[in-house]
């Protein structure tokens, strides 16, 4: 009988990809994915360390799981608790001490060894331990990608594909270089093969992932190196791959080849997440971002010259140590100039082991809260304006899942806006096959006229089915 694994994912899209790959690794050793922890033989928490509360949430989740584990044990059943991801990498031994119910701790670079870890855990358990004590947070020299099985079929038309991992930039606020290790790019051919398999299983849109995705420099079959722009060019040759996105990019690595990919390649979507973090040169310098606001404006001018309809998003940190009122006003000014279609903003959170966490110029919590509220209000205003400007436009929408209402499907515009599309009326007029109103459209790119806009989503009517 097959066993069950429940994987709970926190943090960024790379963790979403990793969770899926962990499921792929566990399949050959008899584990099926379960949607809840109650019937699971193995629970994996795939954690994120970017913010303080994330780690605390993990500990309270472990507290809950411990009760399930103990209830099962008194029924003579076993449930392993594994912690993976970035908290595991950063705090592995401490987690083991603090939460004895944990059986396994594994880092983002070792999950291909899960079957071995399970074997060791099994030996320890049958040896009489209540919880196993397996810790594997190495950064193996041979990349895990060489040891992962082929990915299982993708369900849904939009998929993630990790092309680059790790980061060598060491921004002074960030834990990623410590939790994910040094920068590494997968060879072009491996990525192309994986992308082809995804497309063969019905995927229409692929988001290329990397902590520093535009620093990508993967090997080509010829032995030469491809940049991200070059990789996108290769991928755009795949028949049936309608959309290519990539995230997250660093301003310093936005080269011409990538900028021109937005101009020349239809499948390269006109939407770019390009985090700037702050609009103040003094703060950018203290963050070790290695670029100025002027440099950032210049990149955006070049991008917009290449692709005039390009929409942008960003991440911001407010209240970085030493941030003055004027520094913050510089950030507000940058936002007003760029006008993002959407953006994330966070209060600075001192992360253990990072240089900025020990600075004595920490900004008081109330100041951070007040700045964050002002910044978010401005970003929301721009986001609503961007969405409202979509009314009356026709856009391609990739329909991904059922909407809230009967006959409605939910998809994404080229600019990553959520679009609710009523497909029920169109069923009679458009020959798309399928008996029920959904089947012909689900997973497809369709042409939609936008009729309504809200802060977080759009509504539109079907104009035609694309192929
Ligand atoms: N590689 C990406 C970002 C990875 S982390 C980049 O270079 O932009 C995702 C976002 O979390 C960051 O962009 C940043 O805005 C936020 N973040 C990271 N560390 C943080 C910290 N210590 N406090 C607050 N926000 C943080
Ligand atoms: Fe973190 Fe900076 Fe690397 Fe992004 S570039 S992952 S913010 S260290
Ligand atoms: Fe979090 Fe690690 Fe991603 S810290 S944001 S899960 S790289």
Image (tube, rainbow, N blue to C red):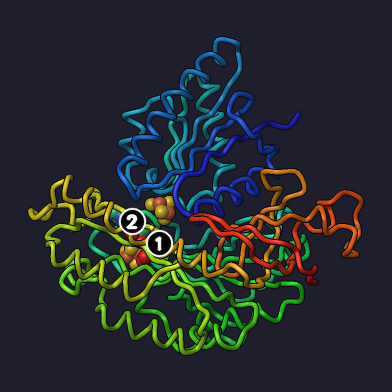
How many neighbours does mark 1 have within 10 angstroms: few (below 14), some (14-19), or many (20 or more)? many
**Residue at the image position 64 percent from the left and 65 percent from the top:** 450
> Does residue 256 appear to the left or right of 362 in the view shown?
right
Quadrant observed for ligand 2 in the rendered image: bottom left
Question: 83 and 350: which one is in front?
Answer: 350
Q: Position of residue 455 (x, y in %)?
A: 48, 56
Distance of label 1 from label 2 (alpha carbons): 11 Å
Q: Which residue, given by chain and number where applicable, does mark 1 sit on? A: 343
Question: 205 and 436: which one is in front?
Answer: 436
SS class, disc 2: helix
> Does residue 277 appear to the left or right of 145 in the view shown?
left
Q: How many marks?
A: 2
**Residue at the image position 62 percent from the left and 72 percent from the top:** 393
> Considering the image in quadrants, where does the C terminus appear?
bottom right
**Residue at the image position 12 percent from the left and 62 percent from the top:** 324
Task: Classify residue 270 by image quadrant.
Answer: bottom right
**Residue at the image position 64 percent from the left and 25 percent from the top:** 39
Q: Earlier in the sequence, mark 1 or mark 2?
A: 1
Q: Is residue 459 above or below residue 336?
A: above
Q: Is residue 466 above or below residue 40?
A: below
Q: Which circle marks residue 377 in the picture?
A: 2
Task: Classify residue 411 by image quadrant.
Answer: bottom right
Q: Position of residue 237 (x, y in %)?
A: 70, 81
Q: Residue furthest left?
A: 360
Q: Position of residue 185 (x, y in %)?
A: 49, 71
């Amino acid at each position: 009988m097959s066993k069950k694994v429940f994987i709970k994912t926190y943090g960024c899209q790379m963790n979403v990809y990793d969770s899926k790959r962990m499921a792929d690794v566990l399949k050959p050793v008899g584990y099926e994915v379960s949607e809840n922890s109650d019937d699971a033989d193995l629970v994996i928490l795939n954690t994120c360390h970017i913010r303080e509360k994330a780690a605390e949430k993990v500990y309270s989740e472990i507290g809950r799981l411990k009760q399930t584990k103990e209830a099962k044990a008194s029924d003579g059943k076993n449930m392993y608790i594994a912690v993976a991801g970035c908290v595991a990498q950063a705090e592995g031994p401490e987690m083991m001490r603090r939460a004895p119910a944990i059986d396994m701790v594994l880092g983002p670079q070792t999950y291909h060894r899960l079957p071995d870890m399970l074997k060791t855990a099994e030996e320890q358990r049958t040896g009489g331990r209540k919880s196993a004590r397996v810790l594997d947070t190495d950064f193996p020299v041979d990349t895990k990608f060489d040891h992962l099985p082929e990915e299982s079929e993708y369900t849904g038309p939009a998929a993630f594909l990790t092309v680059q991992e790790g980061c060598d930039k060491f921004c002074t606020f960030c834990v990623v270089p410590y939790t994910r290790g040094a920068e590494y790019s997968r060879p072009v051919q491996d990525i192309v093969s994986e992308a082809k398999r995804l497309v063969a299983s019905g995927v229409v849109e692929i988001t290329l992932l990397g902590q520093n995705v535009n620093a990508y420099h993967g090997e080509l079959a010829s032995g030469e190196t491809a940049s991200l722009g070059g990789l996108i060019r290769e991928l755009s040759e795949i028949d049936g791959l309608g959309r290519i996105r990539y995230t997250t990019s660093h301003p310093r690595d936005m080269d011409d080849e990538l900028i021109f990919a937005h101009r020349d390649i239809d499948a390269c979507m006109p939407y770019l997440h390009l985090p700037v973090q702050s609009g103040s040169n003094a703060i950018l310098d203290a963050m070790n971002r290695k670029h100025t606001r002027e440099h950032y404006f210049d990149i955006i001018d070049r991008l917009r010259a290449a692709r005039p309809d390009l929409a942008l998003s960003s991440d911001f940190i407010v209240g970085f140590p030493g941030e003055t009122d004027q520094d913050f006003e510089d950030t507000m000014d940058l936002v007003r100039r760029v006008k993002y279609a959407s953006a994330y903003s966070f209060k600075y959170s001192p992360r253990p082991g990072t240089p900025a966490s020990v600075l004595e110029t920490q900004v008081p919590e109330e100041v951070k809260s007040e700045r964050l509220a002002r910044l978010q209000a401005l970003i929301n205003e721009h986001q609503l304006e961007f969405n409202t400007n979509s009314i009356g436009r026709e856009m391609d929408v990739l329909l991904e899942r059922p909407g809230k209402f009967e006959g409605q499907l939910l998809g994404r515009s080229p600019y990553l806006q959520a679009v609710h599309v009523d497909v029920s009326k169109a069923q009679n007029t458009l020959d798309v096959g399928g008996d029920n109103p959904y089947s012909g459209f689900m997973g497809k790119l369709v042409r939609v006229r936008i009729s309504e806009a809200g802060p977080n989503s759009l509504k539109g009517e079907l104009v035609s089915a694309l192929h």
